[in-house]
């Protein structure tokens, strides 16, 4: 089964494709959709949406794993992140994909055994679990791979 993990973000949205065959996990691909800092919000959302739709159409995952909303001290950050999540969810629904949502602590616990793990610990465990020669280039891609592994 091919699982697409998505780590939503306005500046960088990470994605990771993991093939699950029984207990064996293998990397199919990962990366990030980057937006320009000065790009207006709606244009960022369009760029992220278009990139995710293209990725989903090309890779044909069985399902999508997305990080669920978490507590944010900054309301503005939470709202913007919610918009990016909405775009990712819409892209998945339009492609007819089943969506699974996981809390950040749940993902960290599934990958590292510790729900409060640091991002670098998650990246190291993703590298180990997928038997990669080198860690993913970005922490966002590593988080997306962790979401796919968690599923």
Image (cartoon, rainbow, N blue to C red):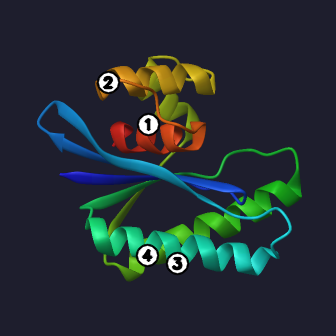
Name the secondary structure under disc 4. helix
Where residue 56 sits in the image (x, y, percent)?
36, 69
Label 3, label 2: how many angstroms apart (C-alpha)? 30 Å
- Against 92, is 145 above or below? above
Where residue 135 sits in the image (x, y, percent)?
46, 27
The circle drawn on residue 34 is none
Q: Residue at x 22, y 34 (%)?
A: 25
Quadrant where the image shows the C terminus: top left
Mark closest to the chain's N terminus, 2 or 4: 4
Q: Residue at x 30, y 71 (%)?
A: 58
Residues under numbered marks 1 and 2 in contact, where contact means CB atoms less than 8 Å apart? no
- Against 111, is 146 above or below? below
Label 1, label 4: how many angstroms apart (C-alpha)? 21 Å
Residues under numbered marks 2 and 4 in contact, where contact means CB atoms less than 8 Å apart? no
Side of 40 relative to 135 (left or right): right
Q: Which residue is mark 1?
A: 146
Label 4, label 3: how many angstroms apart (C-alpha)? 5 Å
The local crowd at label 4, few if under 14, some if 14 to 19, many if 20 or more residues have their Cα within 10 Å, is some
The circle drawn on residue 53 is 4
Residues under numbered marks 4 and 3 in contact, where contact means CB atoms less than 8 Å apart? yes
The local crowd at label 2, few if under 14, some if 14 to 19, many if 20 or more residues have their Cα within 10 Å, is some
**Image quarter of residue 21:** top left
Q: Which residue is mark 3?
A: 50
Name the secondary structure under disc 2. helix
Where residue 104 sits in the image (x, y, percent)?
57, 38
Residues under numbered marks 3 and 2 in contact, where contact means CB atoms less than 8 Å apart? no
């Amino acid at each position: 089964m091919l699982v697409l993990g998505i780590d939503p973000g306005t500046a960088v949205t990470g994605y990771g494709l993991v093939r699950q065959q029984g207990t064996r996990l293998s990397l199919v691909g990962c990366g990030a959709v980057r937006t320009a800092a000065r790009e207006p919000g709606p244009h960022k959302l369009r760029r992220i949406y278009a990139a995710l739709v293209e990725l989903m159409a090309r890779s044909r995952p069985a399902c999508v794993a997305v990080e669920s909303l978490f507590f944010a001290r900054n309301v503005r950050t939470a709202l913007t992140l919610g918009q990016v999540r909405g775009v990712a969810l819409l892209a998945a629904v339009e492609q007819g994909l089943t969506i699974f949502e996981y809390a950040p602590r749940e993902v960290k616990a599934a990958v590292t055994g510790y729900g409060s793990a640091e991002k670098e610990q998650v990246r190291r465990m993703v590298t180990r679990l997928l038997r990669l020669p080198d860690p993913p280039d970005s922490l966002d891609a590593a988080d997306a791979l962790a979401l796919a592994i968690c599923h």
